[in-house]
Amino acid sequence: QSVLTQPPSVSAAPGQKVTISCSGSTSNIGNNCVSWYQQLPGTAPKLLLYDNNMRPSGIPDRFSGSKSGTSATLGITGLQTGDEADYYCGTWDNRSSVFVFGGGTQLTVL
Amino acid sequence: EVQLLESGGDLVQPGGSLRLSCLGSGFSLRKFAINWVRQAPGKGLEWVSLMSDGGNNISYADSVKGRFSISSDNSKNMVFLQMTSLRADDTAVYYCARGPIPGATFYFDPWGQGTLVTVSS
């Protein structure tokens, strides 16, 4: 069982918007920045967002992030079939001094 | 271009040992926190270990503590993960991922392509 809780799967139609939640505690999300990773089928994870809502160079503004208290949210607008992937949230956990990931959310674009 | 390249994955028997390598290019590994993250078949990501501050800061997940050891060769710009007493549940793709410079927020970028470790008799 992961320290951070994500829904196992979400789905939406092309062009629509989807959100993926990531729930933690005061020892992790509540006191540290959250990052998000996209893992396309058969590939290595790739950084999608860092510092809760910052996009690395090359990541389109269709991807956004937010954090409130002990939860974070990834938003994707204008869904494309190429967005079908597993999405993971992650942050440092001060209590256990390890980096923790959510269990991952599989996005299906119907 | 900043890149990481893992190698060393293999099929190994339970109780055996293996050393994974992570070669950095385009940057100096010793200036960043270099991490190992693994992913068991069909499962999610699990952070395994990190080395930072030129090797003065090392940390392990509880699941590998006492069995895995991280080290580096700065002259080769490489980080290693020595794995001993391997178990079936260590079977995974092992990724090398760059973490932050000291004092910066913690996230991983970039990631290597991964190397597969299979523990089976």
Image: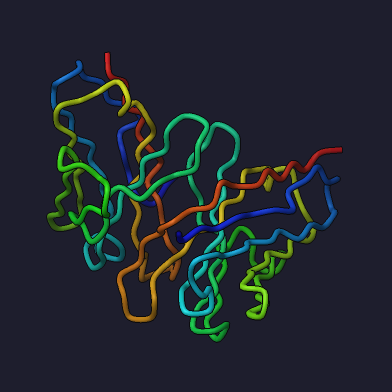
Location of the N terminus of chain B by quadrant is bottom left
* Residue B96 against residue A59 in the figure, above or below: below
Tell me where residue B79 sits by quadrant.
bottom right
Q: Please indicate whether residue A61 sits to the left or right of residue A29 in the image.
A: left
Q: Residue at x 40, y 58 (%)?
A: B109
Tell me where residue B89 sits by quadrant.
top right
Q: Nearer the viewer, residue A71 or A56?
A: A56
Q: Please indicate whether residue A38 sits to the left or right of residue A13 in the image.
A: right
Q: Nearer the viewer, residue A27 or A53?
A: A53
* Residue A2 against residue B70 in the figure, above or below: above
Q: Please indicate whether residue A1 sits to the left or right of residue A25 in the image.
A: right
* Residue A11 against residue A29 in the figure, above or below: above
**According to the image, what is the colour scheme of the structure?**
rainbow
Residue found at the far top of this picture: A110
Q: Position of residue A28 (x, y in %)?
A: 30, 62
* Residue B74 against residue A14 in the figure, above or below: below
Q: Residue at x 48, y 71 (%)?
A: B27
Q: Position of residue B48 (x, y in %)?
A: 56, 59
Q: Please indicate whether residue B87 sits to the left or right of residue B95 in the image.
A: right
Q: Position of residue A32 (x, y in %)?
A: 26, 66
Q: Nearer the viewer, residue B120 or B110?
A: B110
Q: Residue at x 74, y 41 (%)?
A: B118
- Total tally of numbered discs in the picture: 0
Q: Position of residue B33 (x, y in %)?
A: 47, 72
Location of the C terminus of chain B by quadrant is top right
